[in-house]
Amino acid sequence: MSAARLIGMDSDTIPVPLLHREDMSLKSAHRSIAIATAALLLASCALPSFAQVEGERVAISSAHPIAAIQDTETPAQRDARMAWWRDARFGMFIHWGLYSIPAGTWDGKQIPGIGEWIMNRASIPVAGYKALAAQFNPTSFNAHDIVALAKSAGMKYIVITAKHHDGFAMFDSKADPFNIVAATPFHRDPIRELAEECRKQGMKLGFYYSQDQDWTAPGGAAYKTGNHDLPSHHWDPAQDGDFATYLHTKAIPQMKELLTNYGDFPVVIWFDTPTPDMTPALAGEIVALLNQHPNLIWNNRLGGGYKGDTETPEQYIPAQGYPGRDWEACMTMNDTWGYKSYDNNFKSTETLLRNLIDIASKGGNYLLNIGPDSKGVVPPAEVERLHQVGQWLAVNGASIYGTNSTLFGPEAGSFSTTEKDKEGKPKFIPSWNWRSTTTADKIYIELFTWPNGSFHLDSVPRTVASAYLLADPKHKPLKVTKTGGGVDIQLPAKALDPIATLLVLNTK
Ligand code: FHN
């Protein structure tokens, strides 16, 4: 029986296994009963929540053992708390850890899948994996350069893996010795160095923390890959133990460290891969901690029925965003989050920019990943693309930061009448001619395809007073002709940018 069924989720909330997310673990019948009991208390309030890996749904509930800030704040308080994040639109995700040493290869074999999952995918024993720490000496890591890279790309916040599923803390932790300061020859705390640099350079900093999966701490959860056995999906007896004990002795103490040792940071806690191990009661203990930091933003991946602040579509852009919900699409530049030496399948700058614009036009944020190598060097292909994205934003950023979603909609594409998506629903086929973002007195039209002569809108819900191209330093007025409820804007013969030229409509 799937874990989801055991905890009484309705059919709308059963996680659909995908890729590495092949199954979820329950460690014992005893725990199943506890989860089922908790679920019975909450089942009447279950609401579906979407947006993690495409096709997957997780259960959320409107009743919680410990109320979270999202349950108690007023809409105005929420708007104030989310304001900087909504304006930011573009952030840097950093996946960096011990997995950057094997970089996708173990025992001479290239291990399929994402690089940071190598311990699980190659069934590396705990002791063998932990031994990597003695080799980890990323002397080329430079917090100044990484923050400057994010700035040059036009990113407004950074979220770094403080601890990924491998259990290795990339920060100074007194709660657990398997960390970068205590267990490596590096002896430095990159999280502290990044926090200091972010403060200097005016960047916001958030921490990713794998609260549920931990493959090196006894009792930590593990998703199934390959032939890892039920009920725990562990591959080494050293992983066996009690989940609540893991949470009480490692995860919660480490989250306390992260929430108290870095001054005004983190501004975001980015949870990941919740399993049924995270009962509403256990998640409530984490929420009690989060509640002590009332400005914090946290995502929908805590588990235990909490919806958090943000939907987190991963590696895809939803057809219409999530009206009424904050959301952030996280994506890789190649096909891995953690560094893999032989993954060169990088997306083009055009694709990255189109993604950013598409996401902004639907009211979301873009969290774009970099994966530094074992020396702390960011792959040059990533640096190059980020600089190019930043060059576009330096000219056209007004159409992205602090904007709202489109007033139109059909320009994004349409649903196929024949093809189905991963959930069996009509597949969304994007169209790549243009997108639109808005502010109170402007409509921005991001033109991917340059129209011949003029750009036409059938209907505009505002009065268009004038128009110009954002990349034109003189903002020379373009001829605007009213046509019924719509407008025609006369354009020059050539686009000003090969990827996206911004047509700005001043509106009343
Ligand atoms: O398993 C992780 C994965 O390694 C990576 O961290 C991504 C980022 O969103 N989250 C999980 C998969 O959903």
Image (cartoon, grey):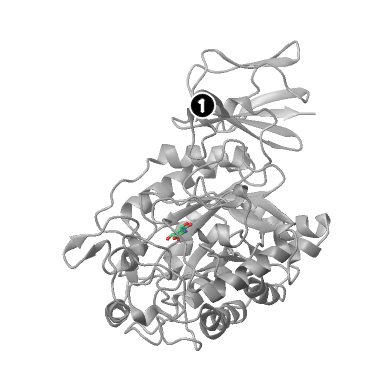
Is 219 or 433 nearer to us in this picture? Answer: 219
Find residue 308 and report its image quarter: bottom right
- For image coordinates 46% across by 71% down, the residue present is 221
- For image coordinates 46% across by 66% down, the residue present is 25
User: Quadrant where the C terminus lies?
Assistant: top right
Q: Is residue 194 left or right of residue 10?
A: left
The image quadrant in which ligand 1 is located: bottom left
Residue found at the very far left of the displayed protein: 108
- Residue 295 on image: x %, y %: 71, 67
- For image coordinates 83% across by 59% down, the residue present is 74
Is 180 or 27 nearer to us in this picture? Answer: 27
Q: Is residue 74 left or right of residue 332?
A: right
- What's the residue type where badge 1 is placed? Ser
- Residue 392 on image: x %, y %: 49, 41
User: What residue does disc 1 label?
Assistant: 431
Find residue 289 and report its image quarter: bottom right
